Image (tube, rainbow, N blue to C red):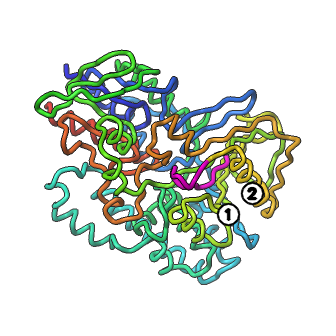
Amino acid sequence: MKKIIIVGAGLGGLSCAIRLAYHGFSVTVMEKQSTIGGKLQQVTAGEYQFDLGPSTITMRHIFEELFTACDRNIEDYVSFYPIATGTRNFFSDGQVVDFNTDQASVAAQIATYSPEDAQNYHNFLREASRLYTIAERSFFKKLMYSTKAKLSTKLLTDFLRIKPHKTLHQLTRQFFRHPNTLAMFDRYATYVGSSPYQAPAIFAMMAHLEGRQGIYGMKGGTYALVQGLEKLALELGVSIQTNVEVKQLLINENRQTIGVATNVGEFFADDVIANADALTVQTTWFNRPEPQINNVEPSLSGFTILLGTQQKFASLSHHNVFFPSNYQAEFEAIFKEKCVPSTPTIYICNSSVSEPTRAKPEASNLFMLVNAPYMTNQAGWSEDQINYIRSRVFTQLQSFGLQLDEATIDYEEYMTPADIAARTGAYKGTIYGMSSNYFKQAFFRMPNKDRSIDHLYYVGGSTHPGGGTPMVTLSGMLVADDIIERYR
């Protein structure tokens, strides 16, 4: 029985562990935090419950595949429900669009401010679906670390079909003219921690995921997915050890990893899988110089406010986005000036709309997120700055008619990029590892198999096939299949 050590109990590590254990491998997962889930965590404060990390769930079929491949029914572990309203988009001119799977309704809402954009919406969605079909066929289902895989004739043909040098904004401009519509669909670049004015057009496929496949919630919050994966992993014999921090990789004279050194001792294995930020691994396990890593641009990060308030908001849906009047200025601030935008886009998850028991009766559990730069010398996070940004966010929401009454707030907590780095080990506090703002970083992310150390693999959002809960889960499945095939 081959022994596998997986460092990190995020979705990528757990999915990899499940797949390997089902196929007879002895799997140990080591997590430095006291709880599993990586960036996806849960906070309970009295009667308020919040999910940290990803909250918009798409591509349900990826999670179903993980369970069915183990002869399990996912509904015995996780209870999904569709979010019919999708994402509610608020614009500075007072317009509101619920982007969901009701295509006629979406077009009608767009038509209230731009009949021309409404006419082109169906064509845009058709293009988004085309891009998704190509991505699923050529990128999602295979690892890309071998030269043979990269030079596949079929892959190269599909690569040309997606026009890799066209940016997302350039694509949306082909279909839309109004700044509201452009911002609504340009925002998909932020799902991979990037700028729509630099990231490739392939990310328009996310409009297909949300506009045709739909958005889902999970009973008990998105952390229920972590709990469901944990339950299945334990059933299959996976050993999950928390409060175990890997300090160093053990490597023999043949440049092969043979295990890890941790805060509780050394452990040996046939393969080591890092479900940790690949850039952090490079600088901590290998002590590779910062200049080498600095050639890679990290993704954006975020500033989070958790707010338990005795208010109910009739205007809020489950997922809500409040756009500034100048969307492009946000990305110039983040990636060029390395500062929090003066008027950022504000995302609010109000899951108590779908599950009232996640907050007090007649109250709300607001997860509020604004995009922020990764950690630099320019971007400090002092208490004064946090209070200043909080004040700006509250004032900005007030301009949209969302009045937050300080007297009704029962619970409030913040999380900065520095907190993300400390808690998860994310390089410079990023959410998605490296950005997709450049051709190489977008299409040739950190490979899933290390180039210089044999028997060392990577899973998670910093490697192929990318960020987001489905892609991270898929990365674990793909690496597991590669290891299974190697030992078959």
Image height of 230 relative to 419, above or below? above
Residue plotted at (48% across, 28% down) = 36
What's under tag 2, amino acid-wise?
A: Arg
The x, y position of residue 69, in whole percent, is 32, 34
Q: Secondary structure at mark 1?
A: loop
Q: Is residue 141 above or below residue 162?
A: above
CB within 8 Å, label 1 to label 2: yes
The stretch in magenta equals 367-380
Residue placed under numbered mark 2 in the picture: 392
Image-quadrant location for residue 121: bottom right
Real-space Cα separation, disc 1 to disc 2, in angstroms: 8 Å
Depicted 381 relative to depicted 137: above or below: above
Question: In front here: 154 or 177?
Answer: 177
Q: Which mark is residue 342?
A: 1
Quarter of the figure that contains the C terminus = top left
| Residue with the most extreme left position | 254
In the image as oriented, which residue stretches furthest toward the right?
407
Q: Is residue 377 magenta?
A: yes
Mark closest to the chain's N terminus, 1 or 2: 1
What secondary structure is found at the residue carrying circle 2? Answer: helix
Q: Position of residue 2 (x, y in %)?
A: 20, 22
